[in-house]
Amino acid sequence: MAAATELARPTELAAFAAEVASCTRCPLAATRTQVVFGSGSPTADLMFVGEAPGFHEDKQGVPFVGAAGQLLGKLLAGIGLRREDVYIANCLKCRPPGNRDPQPDEIEACEGHLFRQIELIQPKVVATLGNFATKLLSGKPAGITRVHGREQEVTLGGSRVLLYPIFHPAAALYTPRMLEVLETDFRRLPDLLGRVVVPPPPPPVAVRPLEPRVPAEPLQLGLF
Ligand code: URA
């Protein structure tokens, strides 16, 4: 039987989505049609994180519904998964006008939403789609060309997860060679999902040096 916390997760995620729907933390609130929170299973073991909603996502309120999203669906089908089996979200929940790059203040304002989302979903594997999500979630500057297809253990939303960088599907739309790379990287996902991520050992407990022994009071030996 599912634990009580497991049963509460979908409700908590829905409540959090309702809260984020009216977010005004950054200037994108003024230009968006709506917040694109995320979609899929609230208890998914596999979560995909892209960059930010585009034109179609902003209109429909669902991530990855445009051409890149269609390809994401095909890649998922190739490993026997449907969109409903996974969770799909973006680093930014609102569309930057004209699909421009996210600005530092927008990233800072929005990243807390993503981390809370991960905390509630508790995925085992977080697949980052493209450079932007990979750098943000790994906290490292290495680009996607160097790190794609290589999992790394990280702590996200308070849990150990396997971070798995993949090229953004948009990169493969017009480049057949890139599609092959994406398919190869996708084929490793079932194996990664079967892995248990062991929490890191607790930091060593500082051992207090022994107190110097205080010499006992000399016994006052009475004469009698
Ligand atoms: N690209 C993204 O990074 N996210 C979307 O939702 C759509 C396209």
Image (cartoon, grey):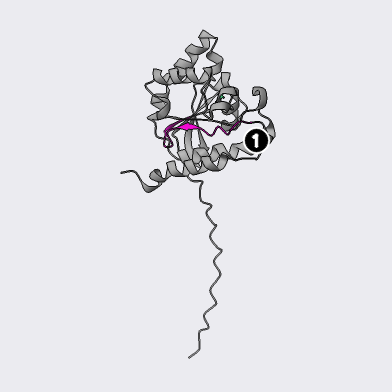
Is 159 positioned to the left or the right of 135 in the image? left
- Specify the amino acid type for callout 1: Ala
Quadrant of the picture in which ligand 1 is shown: top right
Viewed as shown, does residue 196 lie left or right of 143? Answer: left
Residue at image position (49%, 14%) is 181
Seen from the viewer's position, the closer of residues 81 and 55 is: 55
Identify the residue at the far left of this view: 1
Q: The residue tagged with tag 1: helix, strand or loop?
A: helix
Evaluate whether residue 59 shows in this view. yes
Judging depth in this view, the residue of 58 and 167 nearest the camera is 58
Q: Is mark 1 within 8 Å of ligand 1?
A: no
How many dots with numbers? 1
Residue 29: quarter of image? top right
Q: Position of residue 12 (x, y in %)?
A: 47, 44
Quadrant in the rendering for residue 189: top left
Point out the stretch of residues depicted in magenta: 32-47
The vertical placement of 65 against 19, above or below, is: above
Q: Is residue 200 visible?
A: no
- Residue plotted at (53% across, 41% down): 18
Q: Report whether 219 appears left or right of 188.
A: right
Q: Is residue 46 magenta?
A: yes
Q: Residue at x 41, y 45 (%)?
A: 8
Where residue 1 appears, x then y in whole percent? Answer: 30, 44
Q: Nearer the viewer, residue 215 or 190?
A: 190
Question: Mostly what secondary structure, the magenta segment?
Answer: loop
Rendering coords of residue 141 (x, y %): 63, 27
Q: Residues within 10 Å of mark 1 (few under 14, many from 20)?
A: some
> Does residue 201 lie above or below 139 as drawn?
below
